[in-house]
Image: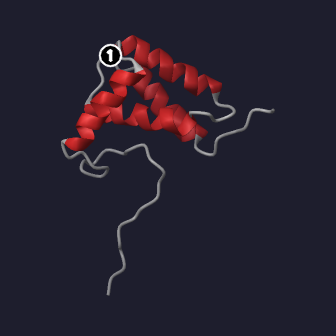
Amino acid sequence: MEDQNHPLYLVDRDHVNRLLAKETPGEKDLIDIARLLIRYEGFPGANDIKMDMLKTLKFWGISKEELNSRTKKIWRAGFRPGNDSEEIVGSGFDTSDNNES
């Protein structure tokens, strides 16, 4: 099977590069890498991004299991995308109702 190109590869590559440069991850960084790991899990391609995400977790000293545990706590504590002004890694789908009546 031939490797596929992910439609969000270029944007995600920038996010992964930013995460690779972080010595100590913040909550948003943990959320971002968790989302990216889910996005690329089972995807037939983008092996460089997948490997760099694993390198990042190793550099941070965090296993996937610990990442999942920590991000669940962050979400339970009230984290929601858009609660800060920084860009969040996501699908880009906006569910808010912006119709002015």
Query: In the rendered image, which quarter contains the C terminus?
Result: bottom left
Residue 48: x and y, percent? Answer: 61, 23
> Does residue 86 sit above or below 22 in this rendering?
below
Residue 55 or residue 20, whichever sits in front: 55
> Does residue 14 sit above or below 56 in this rendering?
below
Judged from this view, the residue extending furthest toward the bottom is 101
Q: Quadrant of residue 20?
A: top left
* Residue type pointed to by label 1: Glu
Q: Is residue 10 left or right of residue 64?
A: right
Q: Quadrant of residue 35?
A: top left
Residue 76: x and y, percent? Answer: 22, 42
Residue occupied by mark 1: 23
Residue 77 or residue 99, whichever sits in front: 77
Residue 2: x and y, percent? Answer: 80, 33
Residue 14: x and y, percent? Answer: 50, 33
Point 33% across, 82% down: residue: 100
Q: Which element is circle 1 on?
A: loop
Judged from this view, the residue extending furthest toward the left is 77
Point 32% across, 16% down: residue: 23
Point 36% across, 79% down: residue: 99
Q: Is residue 17 left or right of residue 63?
A: right
Q: Is residue 9 left or right of residue 71?
A: right
